[in-house]
Amino acid sequence: MQRTLVIGYGNLDRGDDGAAFHVVNRLRERLGHRPLPEDDSGLETLEAETAVFVPQLTPELAVDAAPYQRLVLVDAHVTAEVRPVVYLRLQPEYRLPVVSHVLSPAMFLWLVQAVSGRACTAFLVSLRGHCFALQRGLSPETSVWVNPAVDRVLKLIDTAPAQRM
């Protein structure tokens, strides 16, 4: 079985932007791991299959992700996409970030592969966000999609061989 790392990212202080934190913790519970407190990323205790939560994808995080053969990135989106939970396979893409320490999922994957020296299978699971106000907690519209997002992540980490999707 491929070693998988699930990385949720977002801002807990901006409502639905913190959706990945809730997905990560629900996933950790279902995998038999302790939920993360809000002040713990989970990076200090990486295990063979685990889920962590960080504010954003950064170049330094690529070093932590490099030993894994599969990555699942989880975030919130506000694009024109109408589906409440979107998932797709990522392809690495070298593109300089607009801000020096903020990376797109495709650029993050490129950097992980550059650090590791090998290809890595990666997916993005994204929940539609509805409220990004300065507040803690999810909107009712987004919170109902946490469990379906966890189900999707579980399918990706349990059954998705490298060539699928």
Image (cartoon, rainbow, N blue to C red):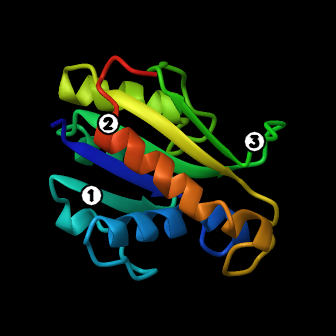
Residue name at image x 34 percent, y 59 percent? 51
Look at label 1 and name its amino acid. Thr
Q: CA distance from mark 1 to mark 3?
A: 26 Å
Give how far across and how far down residue 155 sits, in percent. Answer: 40, 43
Q: Earlier in the sequence, mark 1 or mark 2?
A: 1
Q: Tag 3, which secondary structure?
A: loop
- Few, some or many residues within 10 Å of mark 2 (<14, 14–19, 20+): few
Residue sitting nearer the eye, 31 or 13: 31
Give how far across and how far down residue 33 sits, in percent. Answer: 26, 72
The reply to whether residue 41 is in sight is: no
Give how far across and how far down residue 104 sits, in percent. Answer: 55, 35
- Few, some or many residues within 10 Å of mark 1 (<14, 14–19, 20+): some
Residue sitting nearer the eye, 84 or 56: 84
Residue name at image x 15 percent, y 37 percent? 1
Q: Tag 1, which secondary structure?
A: strand
Label annotation for residue 50: 1
Which residue is labeled 2 in the image?
A: 159
Circles 1 and 2, Cβ within 8 Å, touching? The answer is: no
Residue name at image x 30 percent, y 68 percent? 42
Q: Is residue 74 left or right of residue 130?
A: left
Look at label 3 and name its amino acid. Arg
Q: Earlier in the sequence, mark 2 or mark 3?
A: 3
Q: Is residue 137 left or right of residue 119?
A: right
Which residue is labeled 3 in the image?
A: 83
119 shown above or below 10: above
Q: Tag 2, which secondary structure?
A: helix
Label annotation for residue 133: none
142 shown above or below 97: below
Q: Is residue 65 left or right of residue 84?
A: left
Give how far across and how far down residue 37 sits, in percent. Answer: 40, 82
